[in-house]
Amino acid sequence: MLLCVLCLFLGCLTLSEGGHLNISCKPCVCSVASNGKIIANCSDKDLSYIPETIPNSVSYLCLSHNRINPLSGRWFQRFTILEHLDLSFNQLKSLQVGTFIGATNLLQLSLHGNNLPLNETAYPDGIFRQQKRLHTLNIGQNSKVADSVYPDKALSDLTALRTLVIDGVRNATFGNGFSKLKNLTKLTVSGERGYCSIQKLLNTSFLHIPSVRYLDISKCGIYSIETSAFWPLRHIDTLDISNNQYLGFDSLGEAGYGLRFSSLRVLKINRIVTTFAIGVHIKHHNMRYFTDLNVKEIYIDSNRVELIDQECIRLLKTVELVSMKHNRVTFGSYLLSLNELTNLRKIYVENQYASNIPLVDSGTVPTPSEIPRLPSSEAQPVVQYSRICTRACEAECTNSSLCWNYHNSYYYNAEYEKNIIIDLSIKILLPPNVTYANVSNSKLNYHIGELNFNRNQLRTVDLSHNVFTRWIGPLHESHTVEYLDLSDNYCTYIASTFFMFASGLKILNISRNYLSVALQADRNGQILFNQSNLEVLRISNNLIRELPSSIFKRLTRLKVLDLSWNMMTSWTVEISHMMHLHTLDISENRYEDIPIQLTDQIDQIMIHRNDSLHLSIKGNILKCDCPTLDSLEWITRPYISIKEPGSTQCRLSNGEIITFLDIGDVVVKLRLRCKIVIPLISSAVVGIIFSMFIFGAGMVYRYRWKLRYLYYTTRRKYRGYQRLREGEGHFTYDAFVSYADGDRAFVIEDMRTVLERHYGLRLCIHHRDFMVGEAITANIINAIQSSRKTIAVLSPDFAKSAWCDYEVHMAKLESIHTGRDVLCVLWYTDIPDTRILSRDILDQINYDTYIKYPTVENDKREFWEKIKAAISF
C-alpha cells in the first residue's frame, strides 16, 4: 500500500511539473513523473490479471486491492526496468519459482495482506534468485498460523535486502538462510503491521541476523525473553518491545543482560504491563544492566508506573529523552535525583492521573515545635509516605503521625487522612541540561507558589490542561524558558511577581482560564513587566471585558497578540509601541466596529513599515452602516489584511448578512448613501428633540400606574405610616377585596359571612374600612400594603370599573416591588367578551391560577375552602 501512496504522490508531482499524463493503459491510470519514469496505478480495479496495456517500461506498478490469484508464470518478465511493485491485499496463496523472472531491477516489493503462509510451498526456493537489487520486502499480515517456519531458503537469495516486514511465528527463530542477509538492518515483526504469535524469545532467535539495527517486535504477546536473546544484536540501534502487556518489568530486566555492551540507542517499552495493573514500581533490579548501555531515548508510556527507585535514575545518566506518558507517577525520593540526569534534554510526562493533593495558603514557615499536632487516638507512623519527605525528615516520619518537610511543606495525619500543601518556597531539582518538559493534561491540582529551580537550560515548558488555579510565584531560575503554556488551568489569580524571573519568554499561552479580574487589576503592567522579549502572547477565552491601558507597556517586541474568544466591546489597551506586531486576533468578541482607539494605534505602528498587519475579527457582531463607515474604510487600507474574510461577516442596516470578501464594494455603496444621510442630520436634530418630548410624555403615560404607586407609597411613608414587616402575623388584614358596586351584595353577604364569621379571617372592604378624609388612591395603597392578599372579584361590572382596574395595577406593582404573591382572582360571573379585561387580569388568568365561583350549591363549600387556602398561603 505504501507503494500505491508513492505512486499517487509521484502522479501529483507530475501534474505540478506539467508532465505528460495521457498515457493510455486502461483500466489503469498511467502517468509520467518529472524524472521520466512511468507510474501505473491499477489499485482497486477488481483485476484478476495484469493488463496488457501497461507499458513495458513502467517503473512503479501498483496492483493492490485486487483479486489476483494465482500469479501465473513470468507475468513480470517484460517489466525489465520495474523498480517498485505493490501486490498487497490480493488473494495470493502461493508463488511460483518463475513469478518474478525478468524483474531484475526490482527495489521494493510488497506482498502485504495476502494469504501466503510462511512455508516453502508458498515461497519456493529460487523465487527471488533474480532480485539481487531488492532492498525492501513486505510480506506481513499473511500468515495466521502460529507454528509456521520462516522460509529462509527462499529469502537467502535477497543479499541486498535492508528492510524486511514479516509476520511473527511462535518459534521466533530466524534460520540459517538469514545469515546470508548481511545488509539486513531493519526487521519488523510487529503485530501492529501484521500478525505476530511470538510468546517467548529464545537465545537462538536472532543468532543469524547480527546486522539488524532496528528491531520491532511490538504487540506480539511476548511474556518471556531468555537472558541472552538479544546478545547477537551487537549493532542494535532501536528496539521496540511495546504492547506486550504480559512481559512486565521483571522479565524485561532479565532480558537486559543480552543488550549489555550493545550500541542500543532507542528503547521503546510502552505498555508492557496489563491494562489494569496496580502500583507498578520500577525497581533497581529491573534496570541493573543499564550500567553497560548508552541508551539515548527511552519510552515507557502507558505502564501505570507510580514509583521509581532512586537508584534507577542514576542508571539513566546517558539518556537524552524520556517519555512517560499515560502513567500514574506519584511523588517519591527519585525526584531528588533528577539533577543527576545531566544528559537529559527532553521529558514527556503528560496525561498522568490526578494528584489528589489539596492546597492551603499559609504565612511564614513554622518551626517543628510550632507545627499544629492533629488529634489522633493512635499515632500512626507514616513511613509509607516517606517518598514525599526528605531524608532529614524520615526519622521524624517514622516515629510520629506528623511529618513536616521544609522543602515540600507536607504533613499527614492517619486518622483524618488529610494531605495538606502549604504555599511556601519549594526547591525543585531539574536535570541541568533539559530543554523540553511536557507535563500537560495530568490533572495536577496545585497553587503554584514560590519555586526555586536549580540552574537549568529549560526552553519549552507545557503545563496546560491541569488545575493550577492560582499562580503566585515567583519562579526562580526560569530566565531560560522561551515557551510556556499554562492554558486550560482554571486559573483565577495571577500575582504580579509570577513571571518576574522569566525574562527570556518568547511565547506565552495563558488562554482558556479565568484571568479577567486579575488582568483588569494590573493597572501598571506589573505582571508582564519583565517580558520585553515576548513575541507571541495568547490570552484568548478568559472572559475579558476590558484591559488596563498599560498592561502591555513593556512588550516592545510582540509580534502576535491573541485576544480572541473574550467579551470585549471597546479598546483601551496601549499597543502603539509594538512596532513588530504583525498579527492581532480579536475574533469572537463583541465588537460592532473596529474602535478608533485601535485603528489610530495600528496606523502609528504601520507608518514606517512596508508589510501588512493581519487582523482577525470574525465572530464579532460587526455592523456595516453609516456610523461604522470610517472603520470599514480603514479596513480597506492596503496595509490591513483581514484573516479569513469569507468567515468574517457584518450586518447591513436592512438586516442582510454579508462577508468581507466584498467589503470594498460595500464601502463604495455606503459612501454614496451616507452622503445623502449626513445633510439630513441637522433637520433630524429638531425632530429628535421633539420626539424626546413626545417620548417623555409617552413614558409618563405608559408607567403612570407605577408612578402613582411610587408616589402614594412615598406619601404614605412621610405622612407617618410605617410599612408592616413581611411575614406571617404582621398584616392588618388577611385580604383586601377589590370589587365593583354591582357585586357589593356578594361581598357583604357571602364573602364576609363565610370568610370572617366562619373562618375567622379579617377582610378589608372599602365601604367599611377605608379611612374617612383620606384620598381614595391613598386608601387603596394602604389597603393593599396592609393585606396579605388582594382578591379581585371578577365580573362584567368589575371589567368596566376604572377603580377596580387601578386596584389591580397597584396589587401587581406591590408584587413586583416586594416579591410577594399578592393578587388572587375570584371569577364571580362569566364575562361574554374577555377582550374588555385589562392586561394585568388577562395575564393572571392566562399564566397563573384563578378560582371560579361555582353554580352548583354542593361545590360552594370546596370553593370557600380554596379561597381560605389562597389567602392563607
Image (cartoon, rainbow, N blue to C red):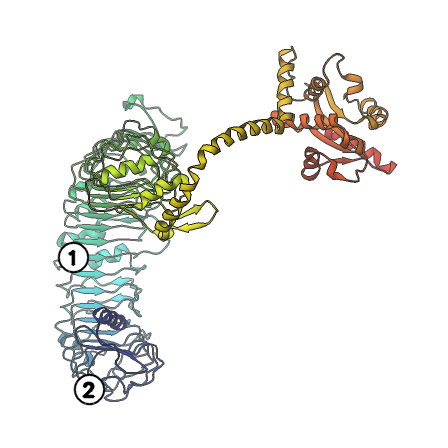
Residue at 36% over, 49% down: 663
Quadrant containing the N terminus in the rendered view = bottom left
Mark identifier at residue 101: 2
- In the image, 281 versus 614, the foreground residue is 614
Q: Residues within 10 Å of mark 2 (few under 14, many from 20)?
A: many
Using the rendered view, name the quadrant where residue 721 is placed. top right
- In the image, 707 versus 201, the foreground residue is 707
User: Outermost residue, top direction?
Assistant: 720
User: Outermost residue, bottom direction?
Assistant: 73
Residue 14: percent from the left, percent from the top?
22, 72
Amino acid at the residue labelled 2: Ile
**Local secondary structure at mark 2:** loop
Indicate left or right for 871 with 273 as reference: right
Amino acid at the residue labelled 1: Arg
Q: Is residue 762 above or below residue 590?
A: above
* Viewer can see residue 403: no
Q: Residues within 10 Å of mark 1 (few under 14, many from 20)?
A: many
Q: Which residue is mark 1?
A: 265
**Local secondary structure at mark 1:** loop
Q: What's the CA distance linking mark 1 and mark 2?
A: 40 Å
